[in-house]
Image (spheres, rainbow, N blue to C red):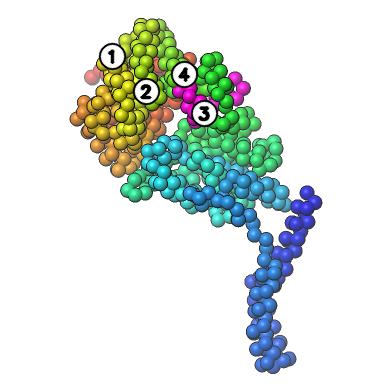
Amino acid sequence: MAATGTSHISHRVKETIRTALVGPQLAAFLPAAALGIYWFGGEGFLMFFAIVFPGILLLAGIMTQPTPRANSGPVDPVTELPLRDRLIKSIDRSILRENSPTKACVVMEVDDFANARRNLGEDIADRMLFTCGERIKSVLRATDMVTYLGSARFGLCLDKTRRADLEALIQLSSRIQTAFDTPLTNENVQVHCTLSVGFALPSRVSEKTGEAILAAAESALQEARLSGPGSIRAYSNEMKPRVSASEHTVKEILNALNDGQIVPWFQPQLSTDTGALSGFEALARWHHPEKGLIAPGAFLPALVQAGLSERLGEVILYHSLTALKDWDKLGLKVPAISVNFSADELRNPRLFEKVKWELDRFELDPERLTVEILETVVARSDDDITSRNIASFSQLGCGVDLDDFGTGHASISSIRRFDVSRIKIDRSFVTHVDTDRDQQSMIAAILTMAERLGLEAIAEGVETHGEHAMLGQLGCTHVQGYSIAKPMPFDATVGWLQTLEEKVAASAVLPKRA
């Protein structure tokens, strides 16, 4: 602490001297000084003053130049922004600086950027990432620090500001998000992006260090990501510490699968014609007994890397079919449930027999199960086993959904070869479809193709009522997204389904003519 105080005083003394010697206020004295030199020394002294004095000022400015702020150091080669260490140091300096406490730390992440990188390729994705950094900076002041934290995540340390309370930071976060309303464009490729934002006020963080404040902001970001794309969350003491994928061991994940901690949550799919339920999609969720709900992005990569994809598939399928039987017992109408199958699962020669055996065990008709496969699997797979499995599901009577359609470049011939029954339009085409003419044209073209091929279509990632309404107008028969409902545990689906059935029944009753 003593060394920090001495350095601070020395810096202030040097700054005072530099300002006195080369500051703008010196200009007020130059005419009087020149007149006095001419009066007492004549033209010779005046010429000497005019030549030598600027050199003295230049030398004084160099000698008293303030120590540069930490603008040097490594930067991210893609975004050209400083890295995590610089953000932590900046927060620490702001805490120690007199009369200039850190006002807030903000962390934001481009939603679903990993999927965009996979579909667009490394080069275009990197250029998009650079543009994201530039857009964030365009909303901020030059004195605010923006850093890159990896994985399409940016960190921000605000410089001094008059007011940085909860309301002000929500407004700032909204302004940054608004900067992404216009799609990112590169090489004739347009991508609509949304940002999830988390921030932490130092007054709410018990440990006043840069590392702790950044960790708190990342915890808030994790909470925002759990709430859906484009969400904003502020840190509170009730939040659990952030959890990264690297923190989960293979044994921990396997125990979670076996102990029932990882189970499916269900997101509804609706018909745009009737408003009735088309089905549910089963999505893996991990509710840790100590850490609470863990975002899928924080454990699925580790799970895949550990080779547990097939085990996860077995767990999700079992709980999904159990849910179907339970809904039937309660008299609730759920036509079908969609379950995702990974490329690794589809390469298993015994997959079809396993699924068929489960359907027989639960005494469920095959049409009650929809198999979801990524378009990238169809586009890139020449595997005969994958083709045989998917064709067998279709012949059995299961639905086959082609997920993330429009991003994997599957050909029409491959769609036919894999016996696809419905295409699932990726959310990148759905975002802002109610206001963006280009998005509307793209959706209309996809729906025309689907109709010609005799396929149904469902749009995913429908976040607003405007998008929902426009998709219905364009002829998309099924929709899924947060504007309808977030993924929910089984118990929550019961009340939700009862409410939906009441709404559908009420809307079906036509008013009597007078």
- Between marks 1 and 2 in the image, the one whose residue lies nearer the viewer: 2
Residue nearest the viewer, comparing 104 with 414: 414
- Whether residues under marks 2 and 4 lie with C-beta atoms below 8 angstroms apart, the answer is no
From mark 1 to mark 4, how far is it between C-alphas? 23 Å
Tell me if residue 274 can be seen: no
Residue nearest the viewer, comparing 205 with 132: 132
Say the numbered circle drawn on residue 396: 1
- The residue that disc 4 covers is 311
Who comes first in sequence, dot 1 or dot 2? 2
- The answer to if 295 sits in the magenta stretch is yes
Name the amino acid type tagged 3.
Ala
- Whether residues under marks 1 and 4 lie with C-beta atoms below 8 angstroms apart, the answer is no
Who comes first in sequence, dot 2 or dot 4? 4
Say the numbered circle drawn on residue 347: 2
Q: Is residue 358 above or below residue 272?
A: above
- In terms of secondary structure, where does tag 1 sit? helix
- In terms of secondary structure, where does tag 2 sit? loop
- In terms of secondary structure, where does tag 3 sit? helix
Tell me where residue 123 appears, x and y as whole percent. Answer: 40, 46
- The residue that disc 3 covers is 302
From mark 2 to mark 4, how far is it between C-alphas? 14 Å
From mark 1 to mark 3, how far is it between C-alphas? 33 Å
- In terms of secondary structure, where does tag 4 sit? helix
The residue at 32%/30% (across/down) is 381
The local crowd at label 4, few if under 14, some if 14 to 19, many if 20 or more residues have their Cα within 10 Å, is some
Magenta residues, start to end: 287-309
